[in-house]
Image (spheres, rainbow, N blue to C red):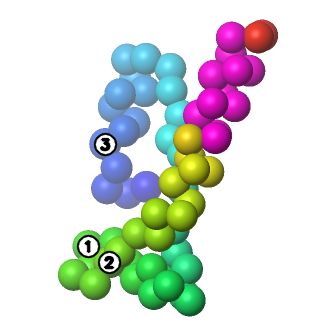
Amino acid sequence: MAGEDFAYYLLKVPGAFMFLSSANPEKETDIAHHNPKFDLDEDVFWMGSAAFVNITEKFLNG
């Protein structure tokens, strides 16, 4: 990602960048970022939480 500074964190500690899309044309949440009409479909937030739980379980259980 051209404008993302997260790579600098990864120089110091291991990590990963995850993209969770909330684009849904039916809810008009498919507007590009940095647009005044941008909105989030909060119904997808659980997917991000579930992904982090899954990553944590795999890390803790080897």
Residue drawn where x is 31% and y is 56% of the image: 3
Mark toward the start of the polypeptide (2 vs 3): 3
Look at mark 1 in the image and give the residue it sits on. Answer: 34
Amino acid of disc 1: His
Amino acid of disc 3: Asp
User: Under tag 1, what secondary structure?
Assistant: loop
Q: Is residue 13 left or right of residue 38?
A: right
Look at mark 2 in the image and give the residue it sits on. Answer: 38
Q: Quadrant of the N terminus?
A: bottom left
Amino acid of disc 2: Phe
Measured along the vertical axis of the image, is residue 50 above or below residue 23? Answer: above
Q: Are marks 1 and 3 in contact (CB under 8 Å)?
A: no
Q: Are marks 2 and 1 in contact (CB under 8 Å)?
A: yes
- The stretch of residues the image draws in magenta is 50-60
Measured along the vertical axis of the image, is residue 46 above or below residue 17? Answer: below
Overall secondary structure of the magenta section = helix
Look at mark 3 in the image and give the residue it sits on. Answer: 5
The total number of labels drawn is: 3
